Structures are given as structure tokens and as C-alpha cells.
Amino acid sequence: MIHFNLLPLHSKIKASRLGSIRSKFILSFIVLSIIPMIILAFFSYHTYLDILQGNVQSYSYEVIDRVERNLEIYISDLDRALELRNDYYNLQFIKLSLAGDIEGNRKFTFRLWENLNNIKALKTDLRDVSITTLNGVTVSCYGVFHTDVSQNELFQTLANRTMKEDQMVIWGPHSDWLGGKVFSVGRAIRGDYDNFLGIMSIDVDVELLNQICRNITLGKTGYVMLVDDDGQIIYHPKSELIGKTLGFLLGDPTANRWKSGFFTTKLGPEDQVITVKTFTAANWKIIGVSNKAELTSEMQRITGLSLGLIVVTIIMLTLAAIFLAGLLTKPITELQHSMQKASEDLNTNVHVYTHDEIGQLGESFNQMLARIRQLMEQNVQEQKKLRQTEMIALQEQIKPHFIYNTLDLIIGLLETQRNEEVVTMVEALGVFFRTSLSHGHEYISIREETEHVRNYLYIQRFRHGDKYDYQIDVQEDILTYKTLKLILQPLVENAIYHGVRELEQPGGLITIRGYNAGDQVYFEVIDNGKGIPEELLGEIRQCLEGNSTPQAESKFFGLRNVNERIVLAFGKEFGLVIESQLGVGTRMLVHLPLIQKQD
């Protein structure tokens, strides 16, 4: 019984269960189910996060807008109070002060104090209301005194503005004359010809900012702070930070240059969401600070819920995949067991129970087993035939009559004292037989094959005289490649004995060419002998194709042997082709693959 192991199926399956179709089906089913879920969860998470961030941003802007509106309402009230700067008593007091009429000005002073205190009483946050003339005379709720207007930033700002720029100016926070922290608002006072006469200003306690902002929160820990144009904090829920710079608070010197916007920054150990808006009336920045982790805590709950759903879904999909995989792969498992038996005994066929793809696979496998049994029998016969051919080829490598005639020729040369020719002849004969044997190797270099034919032709031409000549033209770049040995010598022998020796007159020529085309090698043995009759040529071609009688195989043994050795070694696309024409000559073409150099 011949055992033919197709594939070590049993050992491979035992080695790794992960390589089974069932495992791959389960894994594929799970992966194809999980990947869309993960992608959906990923995009859903980021979409919801974008929506949440948008809501947070909208809420932050809404809170900051509320702070801005409260400041605008308060400042607009102060701006309306500043409209009293053009009161008759104010203008008369300023004109007399500028004229130096102190005595005439006294009757207006009391009225001014009364008006200024009435304004101050409008709001509890007002620290002082005052009028300052161009020459520095100041009337406030606390009396009359002189002010160095060159050091008063609010006064200088209003004095340098034109009539078209006649708007309220906010200055501060700064310390008032009592040492308290205030910010000041003021407007210019102008005469009949729009000439600058002085300013009216109101000092507001910065505690107002605390009243506006302290009840404004962003989440549980978020807050709002105010920063002036120089980056100095003028309000913060932590009073100890008031007066510090924004860069100091955030540890980022560039924070002082922040413009309006919404972004994230590091503040302490956690990330903070920052919302910035500029209060244009005072050029202050209203900054909302929110804890990012607090804002995204809801997302963390959603993420945990999503992960839990994904895990449960994966478990359910895995159980479903295992059940379906077992249902679908059961026929394959049965086919696998049958194939294992067939790997031990090729006479075993697979039992087919279904007519689906698995059943068709079983039928195809049975057909393959039958074909394998046929090919094995054919291979046995071909191996026997190949061994017989090789044995005959080895026997034919040394021709007894060729040796006898060559030695007889050498004896004749010795008797005539032609010693140099004897040496050459012996060397050629030695090289000829050394190549024939070639240590039992089937492949030799093209250079060795060429030299073998050259020595054979040298000996034969010496024996036959000037009956014919020969040429050997083999490309230099193919000499180092390999070829089957002794494929040219039988062809050359055929060209001598059935070609040029049949000529009635001298002048025969045998030409041997060798060249490569792409990755293939071609040898040509051409003679200008009498040629081969068409009927005999057809018989030779039939023999080369394997369609001949035993008598023809014996008759054309040398040519058939060369062709069969090439076909057995390289395939049917290679081999020997013979072309001949009576009275013209014969061309034998050997077609071989280009075999790389070997060590």
C-alpha cells in the first residue's frame, strides 16, 4: 500500500486551534460587529462632546454678557449723571475760577456742593463726585482743593480728546485721596465755543465689581474675574489675587495679551475652559473660568454607560458567533476527518451528504484523489523510463569504436614522429573524456560543454581530413551559466555522419552557435550537408514527440535522448527542434532556460 501525505492536516489543527475556520469565523463575526459599534461610539462621543462644548461656550458667553450688561447699566447711569456737567452753576464756577474771581465764586460753591452730594447720594457705591477746572481747582463732595492735573490720567485723557470724541472715559482702578480703591468715570466740560474748560468725574468703589460678579458662577467651581488694560486683576473671588497680573495667576506671560475668545489652558493641576470678552467702555476684559473636568463629568458617565453596553453586546455577539460557527462548520469538520483518513490511505473517498458548497468540495476532493492515484502511477512509469534513459546515456557517453579509432590514429602519428600532434590529440581526448564524466554531475558550465564539442570536432576532423571544417560561435556572456552536459556532442555527431560526410566534394561546414534571448538560451548546430528527406524528418519529429515505435526510438536514439533529458529537466516548453532541406543542410535548435551560475 502506497501512502501519500497531502498535507499534515492533523498535526496543524492540533498545533493551533486559532487557525481553524470556526475560530476565524467567530473572530471575523465579532470584529465586523464590534468595529462599527466602536466607530459609532467614537463619533457619537465626539459629536456629543462638540455639542456639550458648544453649550458650555454659549452658557459662558451668556454669563459674561450678563456681567457686561450689569456693568453697562451701571456705567450708563453714571453717564447720565455726568450730563449735569453743563449745569449753569458748574459753568459759572469754572469761568470765574479760570478768571481768578475767587470772591465772586463763593456764592456758587455751596450750590455745587449740594449738587455733587445729591449725585453721590444716588448710589451707595459712589465715593466722590468732583469738578476740576483747567487750572487745577477741584470742587468735590469733601471740599475745594487744588489738583495737579498733569498727574491726573483721567483729566489728561479728556483734555486731549476732540469734540467729536466727547465720550465718557473710565480710569482705574486707582487709589483715591482717602486711600481707598476706586475707578473713576468722567466727561469733559466745554465752553460756548467748544473750548475745553475742565472735567466732571465720579469715583466708584471697586466693591461694586464684587457686588456684580460675586453671585455669577460657572458650574460648581467656575467664576468670573475682571482684568484691566494692563493685565492687572481688578476683581477676583479671592481678594488676595486682586492687584496681581493675569500672567502671574495663570503662569503664562502671554495671557496679558488675550483677546476675546474661547479656549482651554492649564491652571493648577487641572485644565480650565477660559472665555474672554472685552468690556469696550473701560477696555477691561471679562474672563470666565470653568473647570473642564467638571464640565465633562457628564461625558464620563455617558462613556461608562456606553462601554458597559459595548461589553454586554460583545458577550452576546460572541455567544451568537459560537453557535452559528458550530452550525456552519460542522460539515467542514466532517470533511476534515474524511480528508485526514485520505491523507493516510489514498484509496479512501470522502462521503458526500449535502449538495451545497461543502458537498461540492467533497466531490472535487474525490476527483483529486482519483487524479493523484493516476499521476502517481504515471510518475512511477516515467521514473522507470528516466532511469533507463539515464543508464543508456551513460553507456553511450563512451563509444568504443570512437576510442579505438582515435587511439589507432595516435599510434599512426607516433610512427611518423609527429609528436606535437600526438600531444595535442591526447590532450583533446583527455579533456573530452573528463567532460564526459564530469564527476557524475548532470550540469556543467556552457564553457565546459563548448570545449567538449570543440575537442570532439578537433579529433573527428583530424581523423576525416579536410572533408569538412567547423566554426564555434558562443556568446561570451553565457559561458559561465549552466547547462545539461553532453547535449551538443550527439547533435554534432549526427551532423558529421549524416550530413557533411555524405558530400561528394570537400567543403562541408559545421557551425555551432550559442546565444541568449531574455532568460533563455539557444544552441544551433548547422551543417551544409545533403539534408534529411521529408518523410524521414517527419519520422524523427514523431520520435521526439514520443509518438514512435521502438524501432524508431532505437534508430534515432541520440536525438531522442537529448530531447528527453531536456524535457524531463525543464518541461515540455524546452527541447530540440530540427529543420532540414534536401541539398541545403540541416539546422538543429536546442532551447534551454538560462540557469544561473552555481558554486
Image: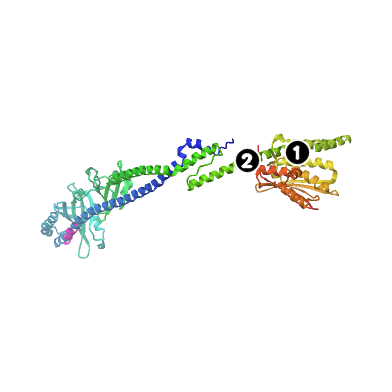
Q: Give, as a three-letter code, the residue at label 2.
A: Glu
Residue 509's x, y, as percent?
80, 48
Residue 384 image-quadrant placement: top right
Query: In which quadrant is the N terminus drawn?
Result: top right
Which span of residues is magenta-colored?
78-86
Circle 2 sits on which residue?
377
- Furthest-right residue in this view: 416
Residues packed near mark 1 inside 10 Å, few (<14), some (14 to 19) or many (20 plus): few
Q: Nearer the viewer, mark 1 or mark 2?
A: 2
Foreground of the two, 243 or 277: 277
Based on the picture, tell me whether residue 343 belongs to the magenta stretch: no
Residue 105 image-quadrant placement: bottom left
Foreground of the two, 514 or 380: 380
Based on the picture, tell me whether residue 81 belongs to the magenta stretch: yes
Circle 1 sits on which residue?
396
Q: Give, as a three-letter code, the residue at label 1.
A: Glu
Relative to 333, does residue 79 appear above or below in the rendering?
Answer: below
SS label for mark 1:
helix
Residue 562's x, y, as percent?
72, 43
